[in-house]
Amino acid sequence: MIASQPMRWTQRGAALIMALLVVALATMLSSTLLFRQDVWLRQVETQRDLAQVRMIAGAGIAWARAVLAYDARISGFDHAGEAWAIKVPPSRVEDGEIGGEVKDEQAKWNLNNLLSSDGRINAANLEVFRHLLRQLQLPPELASALGDWLDKDSETAPEGAEDAYYLAQRPPYRSANQPLTDVDGLLRVRGFDLDVVARLRPHVSALPGYHRANVNTASATVLAALLPNMTPAEVRQLLVQREAIPFKDFGDLRTRLPRLEITPDPNQIDTRSRFFSVLIRARYGRAGITTEALLERQGAGWPAIVWQKYE
């Protein structure tokens, strides 16, 4: 009888330990389920916030299209003093914020202007691009490399590069023989590295087709390339003139130039723009988004979205 007492205590101890293990397991399972439920709820909330922030960003693009359409109805030329050019700082919306800006893409020089309608290189525009490269203290022979990349033939221009050069790279590839779709496409062209493209980016665009630069919005660098017989002081004078009174048309520009010897090319310069880029930054709840779009304005209707991308 006395020997059975320790056995009963042992059995009770084992039962107590088992009970504690069951409680611990149940607690662990409960915590895991609660944690997974919390993660799931957060994922649902994030997806909801992301959908909402996309709608807010889309509203920003729609706002830009509306402003540009209205501007086309009331103005015959484009300049930096118009409503579309006002940068909108981050503004509060319900549980979020939105801000952005519209830029005139024809304030830059269109790289695809190098191509003529027959797919060959336009000699006059090739020279303009050389002037632009010199303004940025970049090698002017880069113009020949880009010309070979764009044109439809396989003949290598002096200081240029065609398939023979690109097929020798690792990995090998061929020249595009077609217009650029974006400025980053320059990185595949001989001689255009990250530093070169970064220096060019503020002054060049890659618009579909041939498009003149807007003298009312173009930078001093672009204007100097388009008007190579103007001195730096005369270019600065032109910038001061347009800020006071924007140029209405090409004839207005001609009459206000400082010297008769300056002969701008009407095929290079305009006072009205067709392409604009829009950058919208939006936030809602836990989600934030940046969207960029290229808009093409034709007539007084809403501009078309050429492309749009999200980050």
Image (cartoon, helix red, strand yellow):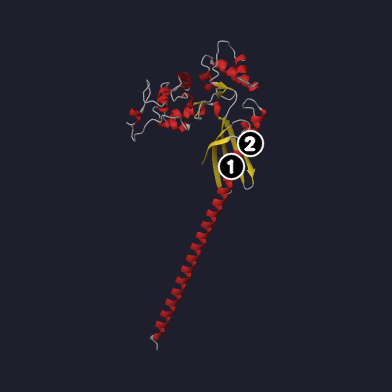
At 56% across and 48% down in the image, what residue appears?
51
Quarter where residue 250 is shown: top right
Q: Assign the N terminus to one quadrant of the image.
A: bottom left
Seen from the viewer's position, the closer of residues 92 and 203 is 203
At 61% across and 17% down in the image, what residue appears?
251
Examine the rendered structure and indicate whether residue 46 appears above or below residue 72.
below
> Does dot 1 land on a helix, a strand or a loop?
helix
Examine the rendered structure and indicate whether residue 27 appears above or below residue 217.
below
Examine the rendered structure and indicate whether residue 89 appears above or below residue 234.
below
State the residue lying farthest toward the front. Answer: 118
Estimate the x, y position of residue 267 in percent, counting from the top left: 53, 20
| Residue type at tag 1 | Gly
Seen from the viewer's position, the closer of residues 36 and 113 is 113
Quarter where residue 119 is shown: top left
Q: Which is more N-terminal, label 2 or label 1?
A: 1
State the residue lying farthest toward the left. Answer: 168
At label 2, counting other C-alpha atoms closer than 10 Å, the crowd grade (few under 14, some 14-19, many 20 or more) is some
Determine whether label 1 and label 2 are within 8 Å by CB. Answer: no
Q: Mark 2 points at which residue?
A: 66
At label 1, counting other C-alpha atoms closer than 10 Å, the crowd grade (few under 14, some 14-19, many 20 or more) is some
- Give the CA distance from mark 1 to mark 2: 12 Å
Estimate the x, y position of residue 186 in percent, counting from the top left: 43, 30
Horizontal side of 219 relative to 164 (left or right) equals right
Residue 58: numbered disc:
1
Estimate the x, y position of residue 82 in percent, counting from the top left: 64, 29
Estimate the x, y position of residue 9 in percent, counting from the top left: 42, 81
Seen from the viewer's position, the closer of residues 196 and 3 is 196
> Does dot 2 land on a helix, a strand or a loop?
helix
At 40% across and 25% down in the image, what residue appears?
148
Quarter where residue 195 is shown: top left
